[in-house]
Amino acid sequence: MCHPQMRTLVFVAWLLFYVFFLLSMRRMWTGKYVRSPLARALFTNMVTETDTTGQEALKWYHCCPDMLGEQVRAQFVQSHLDEETEAFLRKSMEKSSWLFTQLYHSFFSTIFSPLVSRTSINGFLGRGSMFVFSKDQFHRLLRIGPEWKGQRMLDLGAGDGGVTEVMGCHFHQVFATEVSTPMKWHLQKKNYSLLGIDEWHRTGFQYDLISCLNLLDRCDEPLQLLQDIKRSLVPLTGRLILAVVLPFQPYVETGGTWVRPKEHIKVSGKTWEEQVTHLSTEVFQKVGLEVEAVTRLPYLCEGDMYKDYYVLDDAVFVLKPQD
């Protein structure tokens, strides 16, 4: 058996090597060091650089309305990079520069990732917050003013509740669902009423607003989910705000592995506009939901020691039950 001092030296040496390795990886994982064309393409499409230019940010919101289907074109709402979005980006950049915090996060994730989901790890560490839309963008999509109030809303898969706060201030009762236990703790601290993932549509009451943000491509039965949401909305006035990552690539995490969902929605089209049109006319309409508004927004997530923040392409819909 090794002497205790020897074990301590070995551990310290291993820790120093780990830190050196992470710092080396951070230097390598930047655009100018990604030499493979495929790797560079993935890098360019999935993450942003720290010094994001205004021109690059414009791509996050760019849409050609003429390429949208006739039924969808009139409902398109043009969004822009606003102050609240910029504030989230600045905060993400600042947190990414906290080297020792990021090293601790990386070390913790490396140890526990084989046992715990990424969402739960982020919940434990208080990191990985998401940003989908600002207050102003939410108001414009719902066509409401800052003082508007509703009775009851539900946020499905609410995470740490960061996006829930943008919507929740407009409702007297805020309900949420979440699978991750650490994320549930965050939601409870914010005094949101938690519902089970199998009980929210069986409570006996209906909601003025249901939000389903970046969940449709990660659930096992997306069409059933849409039907349950439709039945749970207040008739005539109830609305669903739905965010979908495009291109649409559905998969479900089961026991640490990723598998195809039971209900597979195949979305046609190569461009953002074509996929939005297909979802609107071939998916939503078939479950009895009509597009009232749609916009293009970046789906932002706090970064780590490798990148200041991550970004994916979202289509955000406001849907109402068809008469």
Image: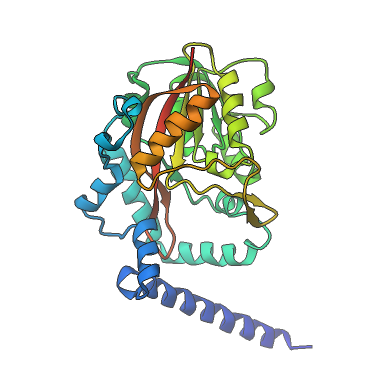
Q: Is residue 116 left or right of residue 191?
A: right
Q: In the current view of this chain or complex, which residue is farthest to the right?
A: 1
Rendered position, 273 above or below 206: below
Quadrant of residue 148 within the rendered picture: top left
Residue under the image location 32 percent in, 68 percent down? 31
Q: Is residue 28 left or right of residue 188?
A: left
Nearest the eye: 61 or 161: 61
Measured as percent of width and height from the top left, residue 236 is found at: 48, 11
State the count of labels.
0
Nearest the eye: 234 or 270: 270
Nearest the eye: 152 or 190: 152
Measured as percent of width and height from the top left, residue 156 is found at: 56, 33
Q: Is residue 166 visible?
A: no
Nearest the eye: 51 or 19: 51
Rendered position, 149 above or below 243: above
Q: Is residue 191 left or right of residue 137?
A: right
Measured as percent of width and height from the top left, residue 322 is found at: 48, 16
Quadrant of residue 138 within the rendered picture: top left
Residue under the image location 53 percent in, 77 percent down? 18
Q: Is residue 6 visible?
A: yes
Measured as percent of width and height from the top left, residue 7 is found at: 68, 84
What colour-coding does the image apply? Answer: rainbow
Residue under the image location 54 percent in, 14 percent down? 234
Q: Quadrant of the N terminus?
A: bottom right
Quadrant of residue 38 within the rendered picture: bottom left
